[in-house]
Image: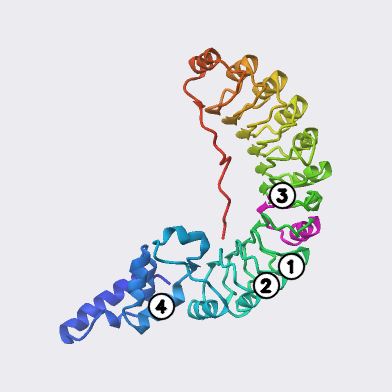
Amino acid sequence: MDLRNDCVGVKYNVMEDSQSNNSTTIMDLPDDCLIFIFKWLRDECDRVAFGLTCSRWLRIQNHNRQSLQFDCSFTCFKLGLSKTPRRIGTFELHRVLTRFQHLQSLSLSGCVKLPDSGLELLQFFGSSLRALHLDCCSEITDKGLSFVASGCPLLRFISLYRCNVTDVGLEILAKSCLGLEDVNLTHCLFTTDHGIRCLVQNCAHLYGIKINNCRNIKGIGFHGCSQTLAYLEAESCKLELEGITSMVSGGGLEYLSVSNLTWSIRGDGLSAIGGGYAKFLRVLNMRLCRTVGDEVVEVIAKGCPSLVEWNLALCHGIRVAGWESIALNCHNLETLHVNRCRNLCHRGLEALKNGCRKLSVLYMSGCPNISTISTELFMLSRGDIIKEEENLATGPKWHLRA
């Protein structure tokens, strides 16, 4: 249906009728034109004002609202000091879902008192939902996740940050929401590789997973993952060598963060990243991997030819041979983080100066073996590409396709 043509036709009809009947008003516009007008309103205040016009316009607003976020604990800093965020429970959620029955994105993040029974309503009102945020909903368990699974068949994105879910809930979700693309399991302390395996085996379009601080996940659950898996965060995890290999086994990984693995896996275990499966890897975050040495860096530099950004901040085990291998093999590298690398010296910096011809940003600060003269010589040759700040935001933002 061409809403523009319909609206133009109505415009002429209204003008013709107005010549014979002066009582014709905007209220005579059909719903299709009003929906077209509503969708062009970008400002939230304008959309609210639209719904306050009359009951008919309110119905159109309710029917066409696609996203909703509550002012709970995550956004309370935006409120005035005299205001306190509302606590959302089952009753409040029921009122909202009965009013907005066609939501595609719902954020309940910060609803710390929301029980599993609150999510039972999604069995009746979640059929259009594509994205669901449950961050810090600490009372949500596998039972609540089962309600999501049965009521949201079109779900593409779910964030379960700090939820008390286990492999049981993940298995139910994976077998019901086959179209899942992005899953955030950060700080889900009761999940293991079995839950990951369920997601990998059932969700053929899986694009991104966060398992940061999930210390019961070793990585082996990713074995045989689809090539669609392109984004993976596994910071502060207790990964094993076989787990590292499994994580890159799909062959489609473009972003990988394995920072702060010093206390879980020896540095040489990360050499599996350069074993041939990560040829499309563009961004690699190895910050705080203090035991990584020259041999590992050389294997990754040779095995990941597509690297565009590499974070090696606080990797104290890398010496001259490691920096030379980066300069020699990373032909596409544009951004490199070397903050507080104790063993980066004049020779290592000189190697980077003479290699990595596409390098345009070098984050470097707190390197005790780099003199002012070395820095000036580098900048004289490569230009003002050294940034003295430490950028913790490596690579792209968390991908949301919903």
Which numbered circle lies on residue 144?
2
Crowding around mark 3 (Cα neighbors within 10 Å: few <14, some 14 to 19, many 20+) is some
Disc 4 to disc 1: CB gap under 8 Å: no
Q: Is residue 201 above or below residue 270?
A: below
Q: CA distance from mark 2 to mark 4?
A: 31 Å
Indicate left or right for 101 with 264 as reference.
left
- The earlier-in-sequence mark between 2 and 4 is 4
Crowding around mark 2 (Cα neighbors within 10 Å: few <14, some 14 to 19, many 20+) is many
For residue 78, what is the image quadrant? bottom left
Disc 4 to disc 3: CB gap under 8 Å: no
Which residue carries the number 1 mark? 169
Image point (29%, 82%), residue name: 27
- The earlier-in-sequence mark between 3 and 2 is 2
- The earlier-in-sequence mark between 1 and 3 is 1
Which residue carries the number 3 mark? 227
Q: Amino acid at mark 2?
A: Gly
Q: Amino acid at mark 3?
A: Gln
Disc 2 to disc 4: CB gap under 8 Å: no
Q: Does the magenta-highlighted stretch encompass residue 201?
A: yes
Q: Nearer the viewer, mark 2 or mark 4?
A: 2
Disc 3 to disc 2: CB gap under 8 Å: no
Q: CA distance from mark 1 to mark 3?
A: 25 Å
- The earlier-in-sequence mark between 4 and 1 is 4
Image point (59%, 67%), residue name: 112
Which numbered circle lies on residue 60?
4
Q: CA distance from mark 3 to mark 2?
A: 30 Å
Residue bounds of the magenta highlight: 193-214
Q: Nearer the viewer, mark 4 or mark 3?
A: 4
